[in-house]
Image (tube, grey):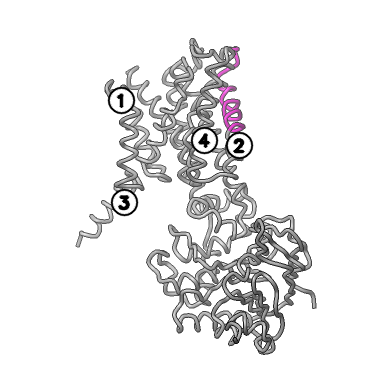
Amino acid sequence: MAYEITLLTTIAISVLFALSLNFISGFCGQISLGHAAFLGTGAYTSAMMTKASIPFLVTLPAAALSAAALGFIIGLTSLRVRHDFLAITTMGAGFLFVGIIRQQDFFGGEIGIAGIPATGLGRIGFMSLCMSLAALFALFSIAVRRSWMGFVFASIADNEDVTRILGINASAYKLIAFVIGTATAGVAGALYAHHFRFIGPDSFGFVESVSVLAMVIVGGIGSVTGIIFSAAILSVMPLMFQFIDDYKLLLYSALLFFMMRFSPDGLAGLFKRAFRKYAGERP
Amino acid sequence: MNNVLEVIDVTVRFGGVTAVAGANFTMKKGELLGFIGPNGAGKTTLMRVITGIVKPQEGHISLDERDLSSLSINERINCGLALAQQIVQPFQDMSLLDNVALACGSTKTRNAIKSMFYTDRSEERQRAAELLHMVGLEDAANSMPSTLPLGYLKRMEVARALALDPHLLLLDEPLAGLNQNEARGLADLIQTLNNNGQTILLIEHNLREVMRICPLLYVQDNGRPIAYGPSKEVMQIAEVRSAYLGKAE
């Protein structure tokens, strides 16, 4: 039972993390290759606070705020650079985060932070919290996509210049996407730190950023249900099969390549086309 | 009568090249002004100055007597400008109806945070359907842009611009790429909009249609203004004729 609880908790954290990137990249079209930095910001904030005897639940909003503050700064760069340049800028921000953490003894340096206190919620309680937060953010994402904010996000993802010509302040919308997405990644980071009870610089490196991007692309960029499905599968596979964990970057990069080549709209797109074909063939 | 648009002594230089030199004209409410000139005359550059994409080195632009110099593109649009671009750029993943409905929802999209709390699009879709009917696209309202010919998309651009209820409608070569019948139909639509009171600045190469529908012309050549006034009088000016037809040996 303990193993299943661990699996479900890992899945819930991965779903929350993947949906947070989907808010920025899937809904608003702003590609980020350094999203693990926000997971790390939340994780370090929360872990250091609980080690200073601050209750875990109090650290959750602090983790969200610290990640959102960093997200706001990175979001500001998205107002000046776009597309490939934004991808490279966010990737640079990710490397910068790991570089700073690695060099500072205050953050545990190379060794990281071990012995992170338990949340006090119990294993099932913590799992329920993770699943509830993932479910809440999934519902929030669906609500935003249906709102006028989601309508504008779709237009920015399609053509930002035309969105501006319609009198819409695209910059404000992009910043909101970054702040909400990164704040949620910060919460996922706090959960991550207290799930594994250990964090280090390598937990939030480029591999993690590519992994979460793979979850979003494989699920279907912008599709909440597709991403929940892909995040669940891709987060559990390395835990179930050790060889997948050993070749994680290779496997996820290959998945990214094949999805972008053969089904850019991910599994969600594949299912939609299959359903339409099936529905079309029925008499 | 107050001026809707004032372009005062606008000069734009790109490095050592002067793209626009001392552009000057005004537009009153309800006017349809044709802005013409040969290739390289600086027409699109001046249009970009009006929309705020290009900053002029000298001069200023005002809309309804409000100086636009310090305003961003979206702020200028919210002041009453609307632009239909030369190269059509529909949102490819939205139907024509939604392309126009998004522009109809400016009250809901003006505040980014508040936009999260609005979900109903029926009123904007109704208005978008009326605008698409006005430009003759009611049958294609639910079609995706990628399935439609250029002529349809040009009309959609006009409908999307009109959705902003502009004080001044800027049309950047709306007839470019259309066949004779399509161009005539769209020119008729522009004239109808103007007859209904819409102030329109029309940049266009199709001189025949411009002469047919525009009572006033502003002509630029090599960035310099060379004529401004009633169309028939302007076309009698030797410099205008030579700019278009070349000089007699």
List the single residue furthest toward the front. Answer: B249
Q: In this rendering, which labeled residue sits more in front, label 4 or label 3?
A: 4
Q: Mark 4 or 3 closer to N-term? A: 4
The Cα atoms of the two marked residues, 3 and 2, are separated by 35 Å
Graded by Cα atoms within 10 Å as few (under 14), some (14 to 19) or many (20 or more), the crowding at tag 2 reads many
The boundaries of the magenta stretch are A52-70
Location of residue A107 by image quarter: top right
Graded by Cα atoms within 10 Å as few (under 14), some (14 to 19) or many (20 or more), the crowding at tag 1 reads few
- Left or right: A36 in relation to A254: right
Q: Mark 2 or 1 closer to N-term? A: 2
Q: In this rendering, which labeled residue sits more in front, label 1 or label 3?
A: 1
Residue type (three-letter) at the residue carrying disc 4: Thr
Q: Mark 4 or 1 closer to N-term? A: 4
Residue A247: mark: 1
Which residue is disc 2 drawn over? A72
Q: Are marks 4 and 1 in contact (CB under 8 Å)?
A: no
